[in-house]
Image (cartoon, rainbow, N blue to C red):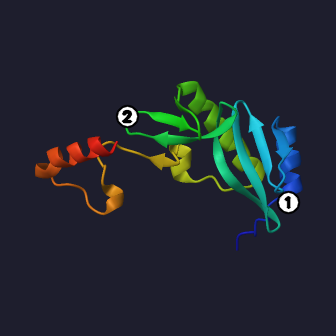
Amino acid sequence: MPAKITPPSFDAVQQKLTEMGFTATRLSDGHVLVRKDGCAAVLAPEGRGVAIAAAPGRIVGGQLARLVDRGYQKFFKSADNEVPALPEDMTALAGFESQLRYACGAPSLYNESLGSVSDRYLYDRVWYRDQGRQPKPWEQDAAHALHQSNA
């Protein structure tokens, strides 16, 4: 029978992250903002362990920007800014996420270890996906005109 894994405590995770070179700032709501190499995430106490309250992202314009996949390129989007994700940004984010998961005792998932996982996927060809149906090919011209008028 496999041994039961005990998650590290919130304080132990903060100490480990500090030893690994992260900067930890306690927020007013009890959460902790951790930063390193231009990346950041928000951690929260959960039971006897720790949970990632805000997924890791890059700091853009002083705000935590989340990764958005638009099909042809990835972007970092914050409330005020949207910038293209450069290769060095993606490398820094992958390293940050790996170290953060290690310190928190979080499992390493197969799909996340293959490459970057975006918070949102916004592809041009699926305009009406969220409304319930995708237009048929013979309806594309009318749908495209409608989409352009709503933009």
Q: Residue at x 51, y 51 (%)?
A: 111
121 sits to left or right of 25: left
The residue at which mark 2 appears reads as 72
Q: Earlier in the sequence, mark 2 or mark 1?
A: 1
Q: Image quadrant of residue 39?
A: top right
Q: Residue at x 85, y 60 (%)?
A: 9
Q: Amino acid at mark 1?
A: Ser
Where residue 30 sits in the image (x, y, percent)? 84, 56
Kindly tell me whether residue 59 is visible in this rendering.
yes
Q: Image quadrant of residue 72?
A: top left
Where residue 132 sits in the image (x, y, percent)? 30, 63
80 sits to left or right of 71: right
Q: Is residue 11 above or below residue 148?
A: below
Residue positioned most to the bottom: 1
18 sits to left or right of 55: right
**Tag in front: 2 or 1:** 2
Q: Is residue 44 above or below residue 34?
A: below
Kindly tell me whether residue 115 is visible in this rendering.
no
Q: Quadrant of the N terminus?
A: bottom right
Where residue 52 sits in the image (x, y, percent)? 70, 54
Where residue 115 sits in the image (x, y, percent)? 52, 41
SS of the residue at dot 2? loop
143 sits to left or right of 26: left
Number of the label disc, if any, that sits on residue 64 = none
The residue at which mark 1 appears reads as 9
Q: Is residue 14 above or below residue 2?
A: above
Q: Residue at x 58, y 36 (%)?
A: 80
Q: Quadrant of the C terminus?
A: top left
Residue positioned most to the front: 149
SS of the residue at dot 1? loop
Q: Image quadrant of residue 78?
A: top right
How packed mark 2 is, by other alpha carbons closer than 10 Å (few <14, some 14-19, many 20 or more), is few
